[in-house]
Image: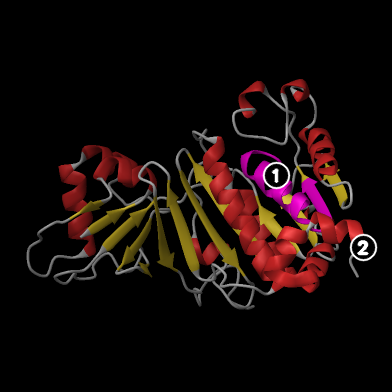
Amino acid sequence: MLNDAEKKRYSRQIRLFGEDGQERLLRTSVFIAGAGGLGSVISLYMAAAGFGKIRICDCDTVELSNLNRQILHGSADVGRAKAKSAYESLTDINPEIEVEALLETISEENVDQLLQGCDIIMDAMDNFPVRYLLNRAALQRKIPLFHGAISGYQGQATTIIPGKTACLACIFPRAPPASVFPALGSTCGVIGSIQVTEAVKYVTGTGKLLENRLLFWDGLNGCLDEMACERNSACRECRDS
Amino acid sequence: MVLAFASFREILGKERVLHLKESATVKDLLDDLAAARPPFKEAAFDDTGALRDYVLLMVNRKRIDPTLDLSRPLQEGDELAVFPPLAGG
């Protein structure tokens, strides 16, 4: 049952999915992989929306060149661990939820430990090798992975439900090369917001998810497109699931 | 018609209608594009002239496998989409 403060705090969104939906959000444990451009938007909106437990993980320290887009962190945080400023920003925006911010590099060795107890995974990474690790972990745990990626004015997003939809390796069998990509905060805002909307819909059972659909945002031309995807029966990651 | 996404769109434009010889394949179309737009060749093909392995291709909004389906013939009115995955966060 929601208490009076919770009913008030979440009143505008309870109109969308009822107190039952809000209770579901509060019971949900989220893993957010990365506290950069996408992770900033994702974690702030998830905290504000009342996802009950947020575990956010990033191994970096805040740099001045992060601040054009990484709105979890402020100018005074330059040089500090992103996990520290993430914890402070998230508990400030919503002190009623549980926040865990970890200063860790996600690896094959620790991914299982990091995801312990989590119900959903938010992809806020900046590289495909770690995304593939998250994809594999989502498949093993049978929990959804909400994928997003950006470069410059462009972004992409899709929702991966193990056993039901194409997995990340079905859609992107091979990783693009690592590079320093141009990054605009507002593109992270668009894609991160889409990922959070997907997670809210998944948890509250509302709307139609981006299942087997890769959404593509082109901010430069102001248009959205989508592409149909399907499971690859020979996929190296999910053919047995 | 060719639909280009992300950085390919900056090179090719969003949409481009091409007239191909009869029985032209997906590979013929990609080669025509590469010949017409050298920056596309550089972005989508490696030094050996092979399509970069991460580039996604779709015909009529359905994924095709670049390792198997480049010889697929195209029909009048087909739409080929070319898409380099984005990786930033």
- Secondary structure, mark 2, is loop
- Secondary structure, mark 1, is loop
* Of the two numbered discs 1 and 2 in the rendering, the one whose residue sits closer to the viewer: 2
Q: Where is residue A208 in the image (x, y as percent from the top left)?
A: 56, 73
Q: Residue A135 carries which label?
A: none
Query: What span is in magenta?
Result: A33-56
Is residue A45 shown in magenta? Answer: yes
| Above or below for A56 versus A24 | above
Nearer to us in this view, A54 or B44: A54
Q: Which chain carries label 2?
A: A
| Above or below for A219 versus A194 | above
The residue drawn where x is 47% and y is 73% is A230
Q: Neighbour class for label 2 at 10 Å: few (<14), some, many (≥20)? A: few
The residue drawn where x is 24% and y is 57% is B2
Whether residue A139 appears in this view of the structure is no
Quadrant of the image occupied by residue A80: top right
Nearer to us in this view, B41 or A123: A123
Q: Neighbour class for label 1 at 10 Å: few (<14), some, many (≥20)? A: many
The residue drawn where x is 62% and y is 63% is A198
Can you identify the residue that label 2 sits on?
A3
Q: Where is residue A201 in the image (x, y as percent from the top left)?
A: 65, 68
Quadrant where the C terminus of chain A sits is bottom right
Q: Do pointers 1 and 2 mark residues of a single chain?
A: yes
Q: Which amino acid does label 2 sit on?
A: Asn
